[in-house]
Image: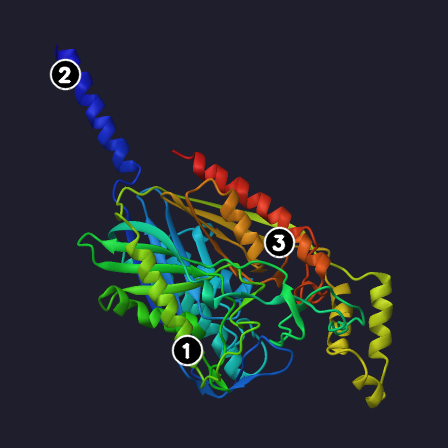
Amino acid sequence: MIAKRICLLFAITFCLTTSYSYGAALRAGAAAVDITPKEFPLNMPGGFSANMAEKAHDPLHARALVLDDGILILAMVVVDNLGAAPETIEEAKAIATKATGIPVSRMLVASTHTHTAPSSNTQKGPAPAVAYRKLLVDGIAESIIKAHAALRPAAFGAASHPLPEEVFNRRWYLKLGKMPLNPYGKLDQVKMNPGTSPDVLDRPAGPTDPDITVLSLQDTKRKPLALFANYSLHYVGGSPSGMVSADYFGEFARLMPSRLRAGDDFVAMMSNGTSGDINNIPFLVNRPPREPFEQIRIVAGKAADTAWLAQRKIIKHETNIRLGMREREITLTYRKPTDEQMAAAKKVLAIKDKEAIEKLPRLAQNYARSTLSAAERPESFTVKLQAIRIGDVVVCGIPFETFVEIGLELKKRSPFPQTMVIGLANGRHGYLPTPEQHRLGGYETWLGTNIVPEDTSVVLVNHLIEMMTELAKEK
């Protein structure tokens, strides 16, 4: 009898210890750090010519969420930038690791893709741009450090709700005879942003992903702690000229505390999904003229309402949440021009007569220079893929402007009930179309805009499926 009691006591003790070691109580912390530039003028990249900002219309932020299940601790950051460079992100991660002990391999840093933010990696050049890089690095690191310091017992839930009326595939088939020559003097099958004329447009070349997915964190008193959202919408635009802006991502974050009746310490963030071929232009519809920033407010308001509806779908926030994470460094080859493409590019750049240059296809000389530059690239480079498990939810991070078809495929093939796919995660390496979209041509597939082979999306999707499958098998 005594032996049986000792065995029973040992079994109870073992069970309690095991339950605790697997993170019976989730902890979470969130923080937002202002990274609005203080020195101007600053170029805002994203186009084919300089776009100088003289001041800020609204603030930029780095927003971080840190999660800890007692075994694994990780950080997820959303930063208001076109696409923060890997070098900049890694420098910020190293600072945060030194302060918190969170491994660099357990940090995801994703950019929103606002087109009205300064360059992320100017190390030599104008003083305001160099100063901004330091502000950005320090801000990303500080957001993680502050979120780590704010860790507290928390409960987690996730859900999604559709907002289909603000996402549009921007690649279109055109009516016969309406397709202009591309910069290489050839005809593509589809065109990006072809205008809204029904005399020109035939049909879109791809789908959209209408869902806004939210990861919701509450404290032990059911008070909202943080909300991490995701929407496959490129950006909105239409902010005042010459001003820095966080676009709809920042306005969404400003609105969410009132939607959830949250306190001052609540942090909301909107990440960019798979939006490489998605924008906010309602093709075949004539939208009324908007004042500066108005369309941003409209989209942010609808997104905040939709996130609120998604959050209300969560039946119960759970505290017994298992975390998991996989990171892989994948070596990719650079896409190189053919001998024929090189010869054509040199021929275009040899033209000096002004009238002859004006007769060239639009952007011909820009892409001729890109072609020559592509030939000078090294043979290969590495990118980081990440998969994060939060209970029954998985988050995938891809460092490209990822086409929506890729996100939809990952969601369909995922072994988890809910899947979030974040683009521009841990860097920005141009567009990532599918092989099928490559065959159609168009801006996102041109050499210079796209820097990797046509089958790269297949390679990356297969890796992510493997990573998600590994996480799903963890007990």
Of the 4 image quadrants, the one containing the C terminus is top left
**In what element is the residue under mark 1?**
loop
Question: What residue appears at the point 68 percent right and 53 percent down from the top-left corner?
Answer: 435
Mark 2 or mark 3: name the one nearer the start of the chain.
2
**How many residues crowd mark 2 within 10 Å: few (<14), some (14–19), many (20+)?**
few
Q: Is residue 149 left or right of residue 369?
A: left
Question: What residue appears at the point 22 percent right and 66 percent down from the top-left corner?
Answer: 261
Q: Which residue is labeled 2 in the image?
A: 5
Q: Is residue 73 visible?
A: yes
Seen from the viewer's position, the closer of residues 387 and 88 is: 387
**How many residues crowd mark 1 within 10 Å: few (<14), some (14–19), many (20+)?**
many
Residue 20 against residue 252 in the figure, above or below:
above
Mark 1 or mark 3: name the one nearer the start of the chain.
1
Q: Which residue is labeled 1 in the image?
A: 36
**Which residue ends up furthest to the top in the rendered image?**
1
**In what element is the residue under mark 3?**
strand
Question: What residue appears at the point 31 percent right and 50 percent down from the top-left corner?
Answer: 157
**How many residues crowd mark 3 within 10 Å: few (<14), some (14–19), many (20+)?**
few
Seen from the viewer's position, the closer of residues 209 and 317 is: 209
State the separation of the CA atoms marked 2 and 3. Answer: 57 Å
State the separation of the CA atoms marked 2 and 1. Answer: 64 Å
**In what element is the residue under mark 2?**
helix
Marker disc for residue 370: none
For badge 1, the amino acid type reads Thr
The answer to which image quadrant residue 428 occupies is bottom right
**Colour pattern of the rendering:** rainbow
Q: Which residue is labeled 3 in the image?
A: 382
Residue 106 pos. (x, y %):
43, 50
Residue 78 pos. (x, y %):
43, 63
Q: Is residue 20 left or right of residue 109?
A: left
